[in-house]
Amino acid sequence: MVVWDVDSYSGFDLSEDESDTIYMMSPEELLERAKDLEGRPKKKRVASDAYLHLARRYIVLRKGDAALKILKHATDLNSSNGQAWFHLGMLYREEHQYHGASHCFKKSLRFRPKVVEHWVEQGVVKYILGEWNETIRFLRKSLEIERTSRGLQYLGLALFEVGEREEALIHLQEAHALAPEDQQIMFSLGILLFREGEVAEARELLQSSVEHPKHQRKKVQLRIRDALDIGNEKVETWMCLGDIFERIEREWETTIIYGIATRVDPKHAQAWFQLAQVQHNYELYEGCILQAWMCDPRDPDILYAHAETFYEAGLTKDALDMFNEVLAMRPDHSGALFRQGEIHDEFEEAEKQGHAPYLGEYGCYVPDEAYDDY
């Protein structure tokens, strides 16, 4: 689901008449116009812009797949269409394809370096990927163009992670002043203040960042208070906060909290495991599961999740060995039982065709003499 607001984008240099004309056209009319321009000599660049505006209309209509296809075509027609690259990057980001999004934002910055959103969103993606210094570099550049609340927010979050705590709080406070009703900024500032020991102010901001029915909001606010009372240097605090925000379906905040938990205690297996559960990007998920398994290789749920990453990678024999190990720990583990049966059926079929998957032909190297023994 595409959720970002295309109408807030400031990267166009359209006159009021041009903007009104585009706004009044239906998607069908925009498509017809784009195709007509594409068929004319020396009109590829103009056609690329027409397809861009069609894609924007699809985004408003929540037709992300159609918009993605159109934007790819727009960049094929004109590889220097910075606005099209930016919109393509935003769609990739919404699909949690962060490396793809970063590549597109790099293109948009090359061709449209004076548009503040291009710098901000590249910084946001770098933050999601945990590249703090890159985040800071892009967002400092964005502030030279315009001091946006979003740029200030993520710059503050990244600065705090590299130890620039005083400057981080200054930026978050400015972001809050620019957008006092923004719940994510309230949350961000509250988290940083709590990490600095400013518990009372942090509690007020974190509780205010929760929008819920009145009878439920009070309960959530009390749970936040109780979690903060544990202390900002204890991983249990962050695990409790993560559970609170996960229960009210605040994914962004939950991810931030569990990420902090892994930095408070890098050897806390459940912190890594819970962080994995809220990751939508498979590479980030896989990395978290690996860290969780390294911290606690004897937890059957963590081992099962680790085995799944091997299975997804096609390392079936290795995965089977791990699923068997899970069942040795917990014989009724439904996921491992299902995978074990599925792999056995697959291997039996392979044996009928003359293969030896149980000896490692599927998933890992086995010396030739092993096949001779078979």
Image (tube, rainbow, N blue to C red):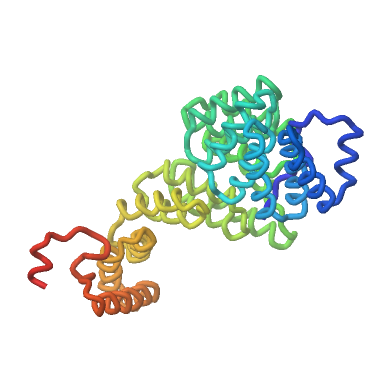
Instruction: Give the answer, above or below, for where 192 lies relative to 273.
Output: above
The quarter in which the C terminus is drawn is bottom left
Tell whether 172 sits left or right of 357: right
Quarter of the view holding residue 303? bottom left
- Front in this rendered view, residue 356 or 166: 356
> x and y percent of residue 125 in the render?
56, 39
Q: Is residue 141 something one can see in this rendering? A: yes
Asked if residue 204 can be seen in this view, the reply is no
Expressed as whole percent of the image width and height from the top left, the position of residue 76 reads: 62, 40
At x 70%, y 29%, the residue is: 148
- Residue at horizontal 39 percent and vertical 73 percent from the top: 335
- Residue at 77% of width from left, 54% of height from top? 61
Task: Using the image as rendered, state which of residue 166 and residue 232 is in the foreground.
Answer: 166
Residue 32: where, in percent of width, then height? 81, 49
Looking at this view, is 306 or 30 the one in front? 30
Q: Is residue 258 left or right of residue 54?
A: left
Q: Is residue 168 above or below residue 319?
A: above
The N terminus sits in image quarter: bottom right
Task: Estimate the x, y position of residue 103 in percent, counting from the top left.
Answer: 54, 37
- Of all residues, the one furthest to the front in this rendering is 41
The residue closer to the viewer here, 251 or 80, is: 80
In the image: residue 180, left or right of residue 198:
right
In the rendered image of this protein, does residue 153 appear above or below residue 307?
above
User: What's the residue at 36%, 74% (across, down)?
Assistant: 333
Q: How many marks?
A: 0
